[in-house]
Amino acid sequence: MSEHKASIQWKRDTEDFNIKTYNRDHEVRFENGVAIPTSAAAAFNGNPELNNPEDLFVASVVGCHMLTFLAVASIKKFTVDLYTDNAEGFLEKDSSGKMVMNRIILRPQIVFSGSHKPTTEELAALHEKAHNGCFIANSIKSVVIIEQQ
């Protein structure tokens, strides 16, 4: 097993602390020293030039799926040359009226090389194994939809 850490810091930079005007910008820092300037989503008075927790959530799901897919493809002796994805997450109300990241659509485009390339059915099976093996997907209740491009 492994342990993963992140720290966050926000500091008030205005005289008042008004829900409509306080600054949402903050910094997410990781153990390796990387810091990501972050804010709330623009719809929630955040800085539209910065990533927000919802963006990072979608990125973690798509990144985990890709890395698991690459591992599964390698085990099955398929050679992947390029993997791109334009994923999209949807912040919506659930059945109880709470705002949740309700669904995430992955749109992977994969370029294989060599003589051993997956059929359409094999490609779907690779994605299914990747989804079932993805630690992040296994940890969330959001619906993840894979639309192979």
Image (cartoon, helix red, strand yellow):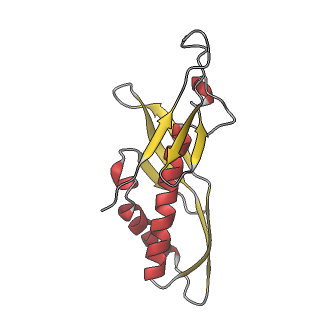
Q: Residue furthest right?
A: 49
Residue 141, placed above or below residue 127: above
Q: Which corner quadrant of the image does residue 12 belong to?
A: top right
Residue 19, placed above or below residue 1: above
Q: Position of residue 138 (x, y in %)?
A: 34, 54
Q: Position of residue 94 (x, y in %)?
A: 39, 31
Q: Residue at the spot x=56%, y=63% of the render?
A: 148
The quarter of the image holding the C terminus is bottom right
Who is closer to the viewer here, 8 or 110? 8
Who is closer to the viewer here, 16 or 85? 16
Q: Position of residue 104 (x, y in %)?
A: 49, 47
Q: Residue at the spot x=67%, y=32% of the render?
A: 48
Residue 120, placed above or below residue 132: below
The quarter of the image holding the N terminus is bottom left
Q: Residue at the spot x=52%, y=74% of the render?
A: 120
Who is closer to the viewer here, 53 or 23? 23
Q: Is residue 67 visible?
A: yes
Q: Position of residue 54 (x, y in %)?
A: 52, 39
Q: Is residue 121 visible?
A: no
Q: Which corner quadrant of the image does residue 102 belong to?
A: top left
Task: Judge left or right: residue 141 versus residue 104.
Answer: left
